[in-house]
Image (cartoon, rainbow, N blue to C red):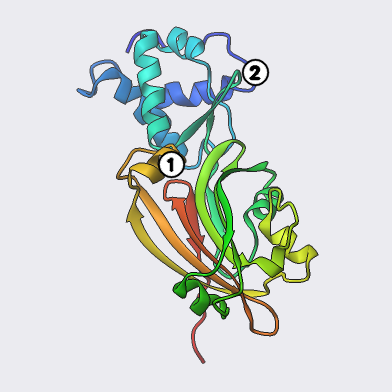
Amino acid sequence: MGETQIPQAEPETSAVLARILAHLPAAGASEDPLYLQLAGAMRQLIERGELRGGEALPSERVLVKATGLSRVTVRSAIDDLFRDGLISRRRGAGSYVSPHVDQPLSVLIGFTADMARRGAEARSIVLSKTTGLPEPEEMLKLGLSPSEPVLRLSRVRLSDNDPLAVEHAVVPLFAVGSADIGQSLYETLKRNGYMPVRALQRLRSAIADNKEAELLRVVAGSPILHIERHSFLANGRAIEVTKSSYRGDRYDFIAELKLEP
């Protein structure tokens, strides 16, 4: 693998570099391609939790100098981790370990509020925003008459500019009115007095189709979670139906179980 003396690195990544070098196989000890050896060392640190979400990785220049590998080899290793969703890139700032989101199933919270409490910046890319009369399934799930219009809102939800989910929400139009929804649908519902207090969620595993893969910046066929949420007001009236596709490499949904007395 070449000389592995630690070069002068950025102060915030010096310790990270030392850990990466310590996990590299000795020269000739592995038959894997060199880029996979480097990627494997970083992958191991990330999966063990020794490199935490949001932690900066050494630059390509520093890794090249420290490992003796070519820039193409180092870049291929980083690309391998990026394709698997283990790291993210920030324009002009380098590569960072992707934060993993643990979402308790017992908590009803909107995406924007959830990211804010984690110290992340939430952003949305609106794919479509339309109003119209409800489809039969929407009438059934929202308890609407054929003449009561709905708002349909499709967005890509991002955390610190990384896409985490694609959401397709349907709510009665009276619940949002003509208000500008902004980043948070739930904040708009709350302002108008229609904040849901409970929800039913159905989760199932799936693989990303070409469109989902493009929007989530993953490889087609990557594992994702399909989630349908059916939310209700305190009086029991249905107020929201949202179908979402979440990145399987970035989200863990956690349920607490108790023994039945």
What distance separates the C-alpha of mark 2 from that of mark 1?
23 Å
Q: Which residue is mark 2?
A: 11
Neighbor class of circle 1 (other Cα within 10 Å; few <14, some 14-19, many 20+) is: few
Neighbor class of circle 2 (other Cα within 10 Å; few <14, some 14-19, many 20+) is: few
Give 37 or 87, whichever is nearer the viewer: 87
Q: Which of marks 1 and 2 precedes in the sequence? A: 2
Q: Which residue is mark 1?
A: 47
Q: Which quarter of the figure is the N terminus placed in? A: top left
* Residue at x-position 45% and y-position 11%: 66
Q: Is residue 174 left or right of residue 206?
A: right
* Residue at x-position 68% and y-position 74%: 197
Q: Is residue 194 left or right of residue 257?
A: right
Instruction: Tell me if residue 259 can be seen.
Output: yes
Asked if 134 appears above or below 167 in the picture, the reply is: below
> Callout 2, which amino acid?
Pro
Asked if 109 appears above or below 91 in the picture, the reply is: below
